[in-house]
Amino acid sequence: MTNLTTYTSSNGLELFIDGTTGETFASQPGLASICEVANSTIARYLTVASIAPKTAKILTDTGLHSVALYDEKAILKCIIKYNPRLIFLLAKAGLRVYLHDLAGFVS
């Protein structure tokens, strides 16, 4: 995870995207924001579920910093646990891509 770029949404949510693979990562507070629960709730769940972060180096205005980030699998587990209404939106977003792949369709 050396090719990460930080993106900040209009509501202040920071996500980190790997420019090589496209994979998205979130911090623990980011997970709490996505799941619409308290940071302490996410912290407790991550501990109980034995979900460990990955360490990444992020270049900021003040230099290179180590940060703990959670991958898409961890993000999805937290969403399933705490924000199940978001699952429908995720499925809807991915359905067309999945069906196109099944059909062998290339746009």
Image (cartoon, rainbow, N blue to C red):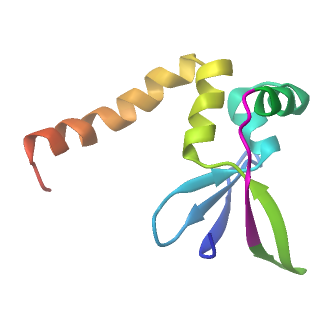
Residue 7 in the image: x percent, y percent?
A: 66, 61
Left or right of residue 89, residue 74 in this image:
right
The image shows a total of numbered marks equal to 0
Q: In which quarter of the image is residue 90?
A: top left
What segment carries the magenta color?
A: 49-57
Residue 83 seen in the figure: no
In the rendered view of the protein, which quadrant contains the N terminus? bottom right
Q: Is residue 64 above or below residue 34?
A: below
Residue 30 in the image: x percent, y percent?
A: 75, 43
**Magenta span includes 55:** yes
Left or right of residue 53, residue 39 in this image:
right
Residue 47 in the image: x percent, y percent?
A: 82, 32
Q: Is residue 99 above or below residue 6?
A: above
In the rendered view of the protein, which quadrant contains the C terminus? bottom left
Taking the spot 59% from the left edge, 75% from the top edge, the residue there is 3
Q: In which quarter of the image is residue 78?
A: top right
Taking the spot 65% from the left edge, 20% from the top edge, the residue there is 81
Taking the spot 58% from the left edge, 62% from the top edge, the residue there is 17
Spot the residue most to the top: 85
Q: In this view, does 82 lie above or below 18?
A: above
Left or right of residue 10, residue 106 in this image:
left
Q: In which quarter of the image is residue 86?
A: top right
**Magenta span includes 48:** no
- Of residues 58 and 1, the one drawn nearer to the viewer in this rendering: 1
Residue 100 in the image: x percent, y percent?
A: 16, 42
Residue 82 seen in the figure: yes
Taking the spot 18% from the left edge, 45% from the top edge, the residue there is 101
Left or right of residue 104, residue 26 in this image:
right
Spot the residue most to the bottom: 63
